[in-house]
Image: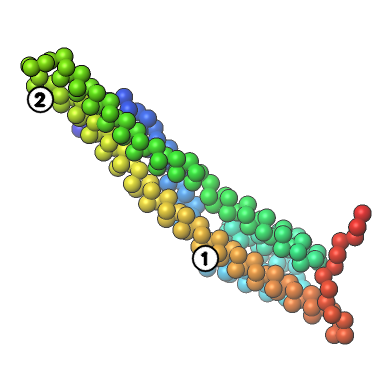
């Protein structure tokens, strides 16, 4: 049944099929990556790291960050690597790490967006080619035209349009859900990074003598 409809859809069905395979492969891969990320796991990682650094156990903090498979872990690890550096240096390093993690979360979404745009256009292309085929049959038959002569072109027109929309609609819904999910994760990463930096500043202030105001260290000029 499905193969019969595929054949009646004409040659445009092949690029529609290829696009659908790629699109749904990306969908399932992103679902596997994004659904597995737990906000609670990220908060627990941050809590363990902050507890360790407040107790002066930087090695334990690094171990706690590396033990978790969460986008927050590399950001905290980057911050711990810069421990003792001026606040702007640490902040810039963590920001770069966060941007890298967000890019990894957004992987393949550009390709998915392109497929969502192209699939309906291929369907409309099939509509045009199907109508051209129907009118050619009409022209060749003249006054002897029958419904069966026109049916092939009309089938092609309707099937390709339906196929393009049936593929693009669920992919569009999934794409928007992925974007929303990534925005929430990015907000969590920002909040956690701010908490880490705030803890770092407080520890630096605590280490300063009471009579001496804290000033971030400036890297030596070469």
* Colouring chosen for the image of the structure: rainbow
If the image is split into quadrants, where does the N terminus sit?
Answer: top left
- Rendered residue at 53%/61% (across/down): 185
Mark 2 — residue? Answer: 147
- Rendered residue at 42%/55% (across/down): 177
Residue in front for this viewpoint, 54 or 161? 161
Residue 118, quarter of the rendered image: top left
Residue 151, given in percent of the width and then of the height, sits at: 15, 26
Q: Considering the numbered disc 2 on the image, is that residue within a helix, a strand or a loop? A: helix
Residue 39, numbered label: 1
- Considering only order in the chain, which callout, 1 or 2, is on the residue closer to the N terminus? 1
Q: Are marks 2 and 1 in contact (CB under 8 Å)?
A: no
- Rendered residue at 58%/50% (across/down): 103
Compared with 184, 55 (above or below) is below
Q: CA distance from mark 2 to mark 1?
A: 60 Å
Q: Considering the numbered disc 1 on the image, is that residue within a helix, a strand or a loop? A: helix
If the image is split into quadrants, where does the C terminus sit?
Answer: bottom right
Residue 119, given in percent of the width and then of the height, sits at: 36, 37
Compared with 138, 113 (above or below) is below
Compared with 53, 160 (above or below) is above
Residue 58, given in percent of the width and then of the height, sits at: 75, 67
Judge depth for marks 2 and 1 and give the one in front: 2
Residue 153, quarter of the rendered image: top left
Furthest toward the top, the residue is 140
- Rendered residue at 79%/80% (across/down): 206
Residue 158, quarter of the rendered image: top left
């Amino acid at each position: 049944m499905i193969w019969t409809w595929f054949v009646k859809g004409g040659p445009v069905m092949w690029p529609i099929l290829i696009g659908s395979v790629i699109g749904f492969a990306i969908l399932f891969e992103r679902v596997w990556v994004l659904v597995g990320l737990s906000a609670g796991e990220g908060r627990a990682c941050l809590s363990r790291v902050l507890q360790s650094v407040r107790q002066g156990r930087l090695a334990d903090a690094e171990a706690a960050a590396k033990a978790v498979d969460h986008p927050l872990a590399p950001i905290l690890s980057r911050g711990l690597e810069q421990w003792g550096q001026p606040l702007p240096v640490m902040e810039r390093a963590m920001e770069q790490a966060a941007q890298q993690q967000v890019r990894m979360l957004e992987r393949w979404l550009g390709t998915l967006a392109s497929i969502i745009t192209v699939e309906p256009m291929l369907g409309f292309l099939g509509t045009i080619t199907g109508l051209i085929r129907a009118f050619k049959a009409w022209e060749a038959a003249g006054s002897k035209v029958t419904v069966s002569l026109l049916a092939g072109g009309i089938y092609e027109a309707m099937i390709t349009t339906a196929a393009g929309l049936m593929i693009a609609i669920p992919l569009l819904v999934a794409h928007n859900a992925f974007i929303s999910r990534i925005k929430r994760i990015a907000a969590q990463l920002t909040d956690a990074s701010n908490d880490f930096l705030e803890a770092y500043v407080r520890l630096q202030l605590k280490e300063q003598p009471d009579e001496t105001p804290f000033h971030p260290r400036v890297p030596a000029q070469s």
